[in-house]
Image: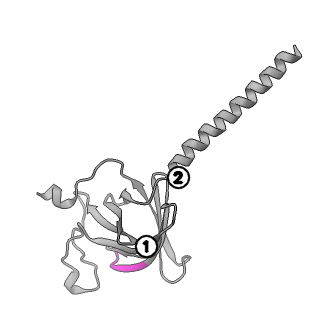
Amino acid sequence: MQVWLQGDRVRGRLLIVVAGVLLRAHCGGAQTKPVEGNWRTPTGSIVTVYRCGEKECLKILQIPAGAAERVDSRNPDRKLQMRSLCGLEIGSGFKVTEDRRSADGGSLYDPMSGRTYSGTFIAEGDLLKLRGYVGLKIFGRSEEWKRVPEAVQTCEERAG
């Protein structure tokens, strides 16, 4: 009887170790996704994070059909207020980390306010956590975007 119980303990421990390894592999795989890719914003727009030179940039690929704003009407530069939001670069100059999961030191343009902020972002699985701020990171606002796994038609492709 004691031999049988020891066998159960060994099998139980082995099961726990195997479950832990599988869980770590599953979670670790989600964490290794890079910042590059297409992301859906809370307003429904799709923004792509892409390599531009040695840095990372962000560009609006798609605007929801019912969006109230389709042009950069809140831009402080009157000459730019009629430019389309579609295809607009809204982030630039981000230095990405070696593991390609986060980026810092760039600027984010918010077309809803017409303001530009310092920014940082990190990919955690299928979420991109952004922070835009003025001066210190505590003086800012955070937002989460969801990864869009499928191919995305750009505004230009949808219009043409």
| Residue 31 circle label | 2
Q: Which residues are magenta?
A: 112-117
Disc 2 marks a residue whose amino acid type is Gln
What residue is drawn where x is 43% and y is 76%?
106
Distance between the Cα atoms at labels 1 and 2?
20 Å
Image location (x, y in percent) of residue 117: 42, 79
Q: Does residue 12 sit above or below 151 in this rendering?
A: above
Mark 1 Cα-neighbour bin, 10 Å: few <14, some 14–19, many ≥20 = many
Foreground residue among 6 and 72: 6
Disc 1 residue type? Phe
Q: Residues within 10 Å of mark 2 (few under 14, many from 20)?
A: some
- State left or right for residue 13 relative to residue 121: right
- Which quarter of the figure is the C terminus placed in? bottom left
Q: Position of residue 82 (x, y in %)?
A: 18, 77
Question: Does 138 appear above or below 153?
Answer: below
* Residue with the mark numbered 1: 94
* In-image side of 64 versus 97 (left or right): left
Label annotation for residue 3: none
Apparent side of residue 62 relative to residue 117 in the rendered image (left or right):
left
* View extreme (top): residue: 1
Query: Across the whole image, how many numbered discs are drawn on residues?
Result: 2
Is 138 contained in the magenta span? no
In percent of the image, x 16 and y 55: which residue is there? 158
